[in-house]
Amino acid sequence: MDLDQQAKLTEVFRTVFNDPDLEPHEEMTAQDVPDWDSFNHVYLITMIEEQFSVSLTTKEVSRFQNVGDLIQLLDSKLN
Amino acid sequence: MSTYSTVERFEKALSKVAPYMAQTVQKSRGYAPDWEAEFEEVLSRLFGSDDQALAEAAQGYVEFSLDALRLHKRFEREGVYLHKTYQEVAEAVYHNDAYMFETYLPGILMTQYLWIHHYSQLQFFRRVFGPHLTGRFADVGVGTGFFSRQALAHNRLVRGDGYDISKASLHYARRQIDAFDFGDRWTAHKQDVLRTPPSERYPCVLSVEVLEHLEDPPAFLEVLAGMTQPGGHAFVTAALTAPEVDHIYLYRDCAEVIHQLQQAGFAVLAHQEDLAYAPKADEPVPRSAAFFCRQEN
């Protein structure tokens, strides 16, 4: 994931979780972010699909444990 | 060891599979005083000490729930369900054993306890339909076998016939009913009642989470009415504005279901509508509607 893509991902996280200071990092999980529940998880996925023009299956998005897994998944779709 | 150790193991498995659902079990504990004892019984009877099976059930629930939420996002934008015909979903869902056993059936079973509107529907079933359970019942569209099992547990003298088009559903239902030692009072029938209506008429008929899966619910309700003895009782549910992968008939309100039930020959004696969650604004929230009916013909 290049720097532009990282910046875009950060913006998505900040929008979804309504936190302009949020800095997603690879080890971050839902436990670290207030309001990261299943509703916001789906909102996050929807935003990522829109912003990165990718399509993610439910099986794929149900299995990432942290932001690092998400980045890895996105990398596999973008490359 | 905790009294509810299997629930705790499931809760851990769910948190591990989907950290964003870590609070799901804890929130559900508030649904009813005996919620956790009930959930413990079903988990322990179905999965016992098998952590792998418990983790797979958690994964099935996560995928089923995320599918429903993602489809709901789409529904908010487009106002229609993804699929319109039975043929579109039959091969992808009902006759797809991998999807049925890994995601669909365990997912639905877990929602009976973890989705407030489903759990509330169960309480309505026990309260209004339970006292009328007598003799022999038909469960048309058994799904996981959850409501057949509830009927068999509610009255230890009743016997039941379960009808479904899906071999996987009947297999899963049999497994659940056997796990509760009710197997000798329940018979599975792989039968499409629309094409081949049973000749037997029952004092009690239930059909839960079926109508929204059909292209022509009124035709199905006529068959249900034909299976119910005059003066007999039926428990029928419908999902309203609740997109799921195999929901094809869009009900927007209870009135439409009540009209169809009346046209088929049922009097609706009581009904209950439950929301999946409180709406934020004017958004369409998934709802479950349940109807307690009497056959009037």
Image: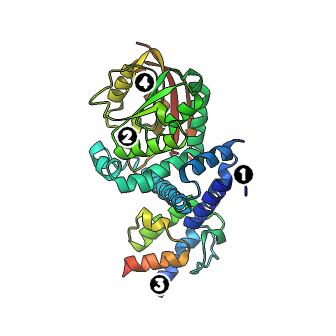
Which residue is under mark 2? Answer: B213
B168, above or below B120, in the image: below
Q: Residues within 10 Å of mark 2 (few under 14, many from 20)?
A: many
Which mark, by number, is residue B203? none
In the image, which is nearer the foreground, mark 3 or mark 4? 4
Kind of residue sitting beneath label 4: Leu
**Chain letter of the residue beneath label 4 in the structure image:** B
Give the residue number, with chain letter if any, for mark 3: A4
Judging from the image, mark 2 belongs to the subunit labelled B
- Label 3, residues with CA under 10 Å away: few <14, some 14-19, many ≥20: few
Marks 2 and 3, how far apart at CA: 44 Å
- Mark 3 — on which chain does it sit? A
The residue under label 1 is B3
Look at the image and tell me whether residue A47 can be seen. Answer: yes
Residue type at the position of mark 3: Asp
At 32% from the left and 37% from the top, the residue drawn is B215
User: What residue would you read off at disc 4?
Assistant: B261
The amino acid at mark 1 is Thr
**Would you identify the image quadrant in which residue B31 lies?**
top right
Which is more foreground, mark 4 or mark 1? 1
**Are callouts 3 and 4 both on one chain?**
no
The quadrant of the picture occupied by the N terminus of chain B is bottom right
Image depth: mark 1 or mark 3 in front: 1
Residue drawn at x 52%, y 32% is: B290
Q: Callout 1: residue from which chain? A: B
**Regarding mark 1 in the picture, which secondary structure is present there?**
loop
